[in-house]
């Protein structure tokens, strides 16, 4: 997880929480809000848990939202291991840094958002295209969405075979 920032046309901050899966390269969520604090962060993750489940590990930088008491309580309660990268070492969380960079280059820098509501629509459309419309050489050719489906099917087959 990481944050990317932008502003609306009238100057209001847009703080985008990006959540990406290192294994499938999916953009799991991009949540653009005025502010995202510790409690809202855990609510967002709990909502994502309903639709996608939770990972075994969440890797983040040392931002106050990620390493505060709220997350340090939330993660063990959910069976998630927090992994904080070393300060000043963004390469330790390279995939989300790459994801945030693409979001910035291809969406945030390209669009002028009159409002956060407009930003939400445009950013979600970008996220869907990122997952469903781009084949990834590193995944062997499929899109992140298709690759995730392949992994889920394999896991299901393995479970059924036991």
Image: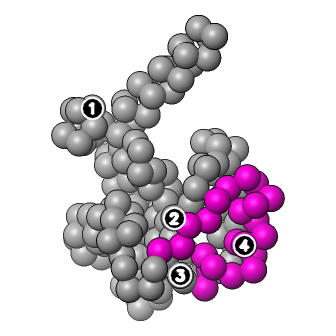
Q: Regarding mark 4 in the picture, which secondary structure is present there?
A: helix
Residue 66 image point, x, y percent: 60, 76
Q: Earlier in the sequence, mark 1 or mark 3?
A: 3
Q: Regarding mark 2 in the picture, which secondary structure is present there?
A: strand
Q: Which residue is mark 2?
A: 59
Dot in front, 1 or 3: 3
Residue 135 image point, x, y percent: 23, 38
Q: Which residues are magenta?
A: 64-85
Q: For the C terminus, which image quadrant?
A: top right
How is the model colour-coded? one colour
Find out whether the residues at labels 1 and 3 contact each other: C-beta distance under 8 Å. Answer: no
Q: Is residue 103 visible?
A: no
Other-residue count near label 3 (Cα within 10 Å), few / some / many at <14 / 14–19 / ≥20: some
Residue 51 lies within the magenta run: no
Residue 139 lies in quadrant: top left
Query: Which disc is residue 72 wearing?
Result: 4
| Residue furthest bottom as drawn | 11
Other-residue count near label 2 (Cα within 10 Å), few / some / many at <14 / 14–19 / ≥20: some
| Residue furthest top as drawn | 161
Q: Residue at x 41, y 51 (%)?
A: 22
Q: Which residue is mark 3?
A: 62
Residue 115 lies in quadrant: bottom left
Q: Earlier in the sequence, mark 4 or mark 3?
A: 3
Q: Which residue is mark 1?
A: 142
Gap between marks 1 and 3 measured at Cα: 33 Å
In front: 18, or 31? 18
In front: 78, or 85? 85
Gap between marks 4 and 3 measured at Cα: 12 Å
- Quick check: 40 left or right of 62? right
């Amino acid at each position: 997880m990481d944050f990317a920032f932008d502003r609306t046309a009238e100057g209001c901050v847009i703080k985008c929480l990006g959540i990406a899966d290192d294994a499938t390269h999916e953009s799991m969520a991009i949540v653009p809000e005025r502010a995202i604090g510790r409690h809202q962060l855990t609510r967002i993750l709990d909502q994502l848990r309903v639709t996608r489940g939770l990972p075994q590990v969440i890797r983040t930088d040392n931002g106050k939202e990620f390493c505060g008491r709220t997350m340090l309580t939330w993660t063990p309660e959910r069976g998630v291991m927090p992994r904080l990268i070393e300060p000043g070492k963004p390469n330790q969380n390279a995939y989300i840094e790459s994801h945030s960079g693409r979001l910035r280059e291809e969406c945030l820098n390209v669009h002028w958002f009159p409002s956060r509501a407009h930003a939400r629509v445009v950013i979600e459309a970008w996220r869907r295209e990122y997952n469903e419309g781009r084949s990834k050489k590193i995944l062997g050719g499929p899109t992140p969405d298709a690759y995730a489906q392949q992994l889920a099917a394999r896991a299901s087959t393995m479970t059924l075979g036991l």
